[in-house]
Image: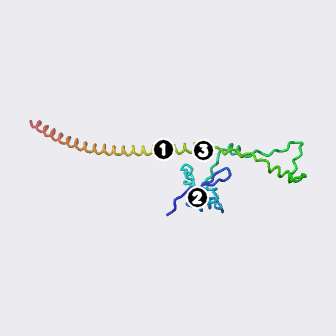
Amino acid sequence: MARALKVFVVPAGFHDAYVAAPSRKAALAAWGSEHDLFARGIAHEVTDPALMVEPLAHPGEVIKRSRGTTAEQIAALPDAPVRATAGEPPPEPANAKRGGNKASAERKAEPKPPPPPKPSRDALAAAEQALADLEDTYRETDAALIARQRALDRERRDLDAAHERDSQERSEALSEERDRYDRAMARWRKG
């Protein structure tokens, strides 16, 4: 019997790579990784049902999803280095100047600018919730329609049975009445 599939995810550039596989080892093979990304804390198992739908529909296939819009990804990039304008000589490398090591040390001592803020997951979470709500509503409506269909089927069977019974009774009554009428007509003709 095949093992149940689980969904795993690992970051891949600006995307998350999802895969439905029976084990972590199979997920690593699908990603083409020779290292245990789970032990390093990079990869993990997915428990969000909304994120599991597409990978489970395509077991063993790596499904990539963008982590934000293009604009959000560009906004998260560090500022581009300043380029020399026309007429200015390019800056000399630090080690070409006298005291190059000192300049290097000064550069290292400068505090790094803070990293850009992590993109908000609110819109993604709202979209995931909207899809989950839609699926829940569909399942509830479908279940209600199935229950109504079953009730209509029962009602149809009851109607057919009542019609059969009533039709039989009335056919018998009609036959008796026709016999009585025919006898009365025969007596009248003899008359």
What secondary structure is found at the residue carrying circle 2? loop
Q: Nearer the viewer, residue 160 or 9?
A: 9
Asked if the residue under mark 1 is in contact with the one under mark 2, i.e. CB atoms within 8 Å, the reply is no
On the image, numbered disc 1 is attached to which residue?
A: 138
On the image, numbered disc 3 is attached to which residue?
A: 124
In which quadrant of the rendered view does residue 83 lie?
Answer: top right
Which comes sooner in the sequence, label 1 or label 3?
A: 3
- Disc 2 or disc 3, which is closer to the eye? 3
Q: Is residue 142 left or right of residue 79?
A: left
Q: Residue at x 52, y 61 (%)?
A: 3
Position of residue 20 measured from the top left corner of the image (x, y, whole percent): 57, 56
On the image, numbered disc 2 is attached to which residue?
A: 60
Asked if the residue under mark 3 is in contact with the one under mark 2, i.e. CB atoms within 8 Å, the reply is no
Q: How is the image coloured?
A: rainbow
Q: Is residue 64 left or right of residue 88?
A: left
Q: Which quarter of the figure is the C terminus placed in?
A: top left
In which quadrant of the rendered view does residue 187 lie?
Answer: top left
Amino acid residing under circle 1: Tyr
Position of residue 85 measured from the top left corner of the image (x, y, whole percent): 86, 42
Position of residue 165 measured from the top left corner of the image (x, y, whole percent): 25, 44
What secondary structure is found at the residue carrying circle 1? helix
Q: Residues within 10 Å of mark 3 (few under 14, many from 20)?
A: few
Q: Residues within 10 Å of mark 2 (few under 14, many from 20)?
A: many
Amino acid residing under circle 2: Gly
